[in-house]
Image (tube, rainbow, N blue to C red):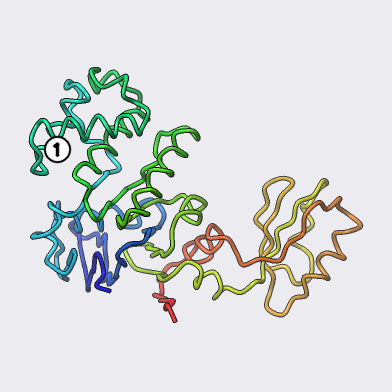
Amino acid sequence: MEPAISLRGVVKSFGDFRAVDQVSLDIPAGGIFGLLGPNGAGKSTTIRMIMDIIRPDTGTITVLGKPAAENVRRHVGYLPEERGLYKKMKVLDVLEFQGSLKGKTPKEARAEAKTWLEKLEIADWADKKVEELSKGMQQKIQFAAAVLGNPPILILDEPFSGMDPLNQNLFKDQILDLNRQGTTIVFSTHQMETAERLCKEIALINKGQLVLSGPLAKIKAGFGKNSLLLEYDGDGSFLLGLPGVAKVDAFGSYSEIRLEAGADPQSILHAVAGRLNVSKFEIVAPTLHNIFIEKVGGTATPILERVGDA
């Protein structure tokens, strides 16, 4: 199947700073794709080039098989990290205007906008000015503007920014429903836990370069089941000093322990049994959070690693 979006050798510099450096990447159609990386990694610059807001210095970008400049306006909905709403306009008027930019008549745009305001539980605010809305509510309006016209590709740049857990869950349900209907979702974030739950395939960018890409299940399998999830009561500060332990990511009474190659997990359980009251001990593949830390933390020169589908 032809990729929804394809980048080949894309480079973008701002003065002497190279924000995106030789990125080549295929985003499959029909899935939820995570474009991941730390702040300043080049994610938003990459998205702006896909959206033809800025042009790459070199390289090519295609959307549904055609140059991005020709295809992106008609086929891609975009929720930017920074909101671009007209604050003095009323919510429904803003969405009517956004719909008109996508070829809708005012009547069609208002009808579709009302449907989305109901789905996003913000219909009572339709006649309010944007500036009267909270940050989270404005994010809902921006999302509604992105999905008007039912574009086949939806790019979401930090979509959960400024949202409480209830509204994050509401957004998540809408994103999954759109994907079930066939919409390709490109999801950019530095929140690894959310990405791990939603994304089928990911690309990890650091310092403008592609570090890791492929199906998430294959990536995690490639790291092996050499991590332990440990829940306990007591002082676990000694865990890092145990033989066979390479790294400990501690959260009070919960730790993820990365083992050295060849280490026996049972020896760790035996070592902690007399010192901690263990309520959970599980051998797992590392979380996306810890893969992120391992591949990005302290990496001066990223090395591309593609994990294939076969």
Q: Quadrant of residue 199?
A: bottom left
Asked if 136 appears above or below 188 in the picture, the reply is above
Q: Could you tell me residue 148's position as x and y percent?
A: 21, 41
Dot 1 corresponds to which residue?
99
Residue appearing at x 9%, y 31% in the figure: 106
| 238 relative position to 177: left or right | right
Q: Image point 43% across, 37% down: which residue?
A: 170
Secondary structure of the residue carrying numbered label 1: helix
* Residue 167: percent from left, percent from top: 44, 34
Vertical arrangement, residue 150 with respect to residue 203, above or below: above
Neighbours of disc 1 within 10 Å: few (<14), some (14-19), many (20+): many
The residue that appears at 65% across and 56% down in the rendered structure is 249
Q: Say above or below: 278 vs 28.
A: above
202 or 45: nearer the eye? 202
Q: Quadrant of the C terminus?
A: bottom left
Frontmost residue, 104 versus 224: 104
Q: Residue furthest right?
A: 274
Spot occupied by residue 110 in the image (x, y as percentages of width and height): 17, 30
Q: In the image, residue 33 lies at what x, y percent?
A: 37, 60
Q: Which amino acid type is shown beneath numbered disc 1?
A: Gly
